[in-house]
Image: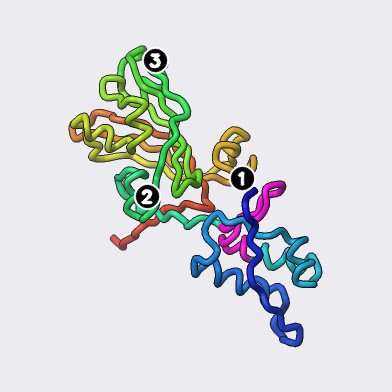
Amino acid sequence: MEPTYEPEITLDRDSQVPLYQQIAKPIEAAILSGALPAGAMIEDEVSMAIRLDVARPTARRALQELASRGLLTRRRGVGTRVTPPHVHRPMKLSSLNDDLAEAGFAPSTKVLSYEMRESTQDEAEQLDIPQGEGLLAVRRLRYADNHPLALLTNLIPLDIAPTWQELGENGLYRCLSARKVEVTSARQVIGAREATAKEAQELGETEGAPLLTMNRTGYATDGRVIEVGQHVYRPSLYSFHFSLFTS
């Protein structure tokens, strides 16, 4: 059975500091120091209230305060866990896999589907190829330190398509680079929407939870469309960073 952590907390009932803050503060310190590692299961509010001899709403508020700050993740029926480190991705033309590795995370990938087939009219227009020409449609689940982070759906021209094994071991751009194909420019649209039931199950979220979205079309130097991607990310673990300048 997975261990449940009971953070060491000492309460001063004569203090003017509210009890929920006295509970939240040492848990915060333990998380930030690494004493409570990412993914660690924290005792539930009922057990905490009994152990510390406080009202259940007091324990609930302490945990909720930490959850609202992104330090804890609370899910009904699953429990309360220390939130994994947040992935801050720069807005540049790069591979998510490489960005995670550069940021100190251990990325891994599960290929959920891999289909070589003829392109539909809409897909052909997106890839700028004749309708019916071959393509690879692939869907992957990307992890950061064993935590599900993003669902990546891509269309790739068949003549440069990586294998299932390659995509399970490396990022897409690295796979393409091994074929002497470089993505040198892209059009990208950032948005947000609610998670479907399937996406929620795969990402460890609840149905209807907010997701970040990114749609990208990548081009080679000669203008050829190399890939069309439709990706979704967990905003609790992921964000985009922009640098803005005056004209």
- First along the sequence among labels 1 and 2: 2
Task: Please indicate, yes or no, whether residue 1 appears anywhere in the rendered image.
Answer: yes
- Residue at (58, 43) in percent of width and height: 204
Q: Which residue is mark 1?
A: 209
Q: Which residue is mark 3?
A: 117
Q: Which residues are magenta?
A: 66-82
Q: Closer to the camera: disc 1 or disc 2? A: 2
Q: Residues within 10 Å of mark 3 (few under 14, many from 20)?
A: few
Tell me how far mark 1 sits from mark 2, CA to CA: 23 Å
- Residue 138 point in image, percent of width and height: 41, 27
- Residue 49 point in image, percent of width and height: 77, 67
Tell me how far mark 1 sits from mark 3, CA to CA: 32 Å
Q: Which amino acid, by three-letter code, is at mark 2?
A: Leu
Q: Residues within 10 Å of mark 2 (few under 14, many from 20)?
A: some
- Residue at (45, 43) in percent of width and height: 143
Q: Are marks 1 and 2 in contact (CB under 8 Å)?
A: no
Does the segment drawn in magenta span residue 104?
Answer: no
Q: Which residue is mark 2?
A: 100
